[in-house]
Amino acid sequence: MSQRSTGGGAIVGSFEGGGLPPDDIVVGALRDGDEAMFAALLDTWSRGMLRVARSYVSTDHSAEEVVQDTWLAVIDGIDAFEGRASVKTWVFRILVNTAKKRGVRESRTLPWSAFERDGDVFADLGAAAQGARVDGASGWPTPEGEALAAEVRVLIAEALGRLPPRQRVVITLRDVEGCTSDEVCEILEISAANQRVLLHRARTAVRGWLADYYESVKQPE
Amino acid sequence: MKRFIPETRAVNVVKRFTCDELAELLTAYLEDALDQPSRDGVRAHLSCCEGCGRYFDQFRTTIKVLGDQPPEKLSAPVRDRLMSAFRNRNRHHHDPDRRS
Ligand SMILES: [Zn+2]
């Protein structure tokens, strides 16, 4: 999609309707105090940032605070931004680091930790994925009805919440927010192979849960 | 070197996968991260295995459905706070008493 191999070329294509200009223009505008540019970034990226933050922290409120703190750090740091990564990568890295710190703090104070759930979900996933593969002979209904589509959206949101954090953040960035794999590798500082494994496990789990759901709503023939 | 003869089995050219192996390769296949023999092997398997064909369709449907989450945004107070933080930065920035 991106024509440029380096810099922020991918930034524009990654978000739907993302008509953001190239990085040098974005950075210049922010340094000049261009409020419209800052608002455009806020409105384009905060959606994905909220979802990513939720992979690490336990409540919507915490997620919003993480996003807020990230933007404050961006405002403070824009003059020092060196342009070695794209602006988007830089912002999302700050986000991930902020969210991780917050998540660790929460896991110390809460009786449970999102990070400790990794184990059960794998057991879960095995059953769901296998079961559906064995007897999932029927095709899925096309989600034509708005009611069905709305139910599926809720199910997907719940499914994301059940994934182990590392899988959740990867599938959120890739499939929910439409980032490229290069962007995800840069943001999370993981290898392409690792990114692919996490993405594949997450997709497999979500497919299994979707299959269970479609099975449960199937009309008897 | 050799001419391709349809009756000849294409040894080492198309990999053969079991259904379970195939399921593990779908993301790599979609990412175009497989080598040629593996890619051809996935295609060959998908074209003749009904179950995996359907599984692949479901896999792709899952990806599509994931991209259909409702938009969400920052609450108005947080957005306002951030806009004024940006504005203030700007004000400080142009304040001659403050060196950056
Ligand atoms: Zn098969």
Image (cartoon, rainbow, N blue to C red):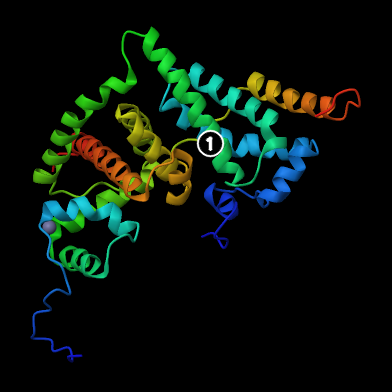
User: What is the crowding at mark 1: few (fewer than 14 residues within 10 Å), some, or many (at least 20)?
Assistant: many
Residue in the foreground of this view, choosing between A213 and A29: A29
Disc 1 target residue: A92
Residue in the foreground of this view, choosing between A84 and A61: A84
Residue A56 vertical placement versus B52 (above, below): above
Q: Which residue is drawn at 12% across and 65% down?
A: B16
Q: Which residue is drawn at 32% across and 8% down?
A: A111
Give the residue type that dot 1 points to: Phe
Residue A119 coordinates in the image, percent (x, y): 21, 26
The chain carrying label 1 is: A
Q: As drawn, is A50 to the left or to the right of B62? A: right
Q: How many marks?
A: 1
Q: As drawn, is A196 to the left or to the right of A50? A: left
Residue A117 coordinates in the image, percent (x, y): 26, 22
Q: Residue at x 69, y 28 (%)?
A: A76
In this view of the protein, can residue A146 be seen by the observer?
A: no
Residue B36 vertical placement versus B86 (above, below): below
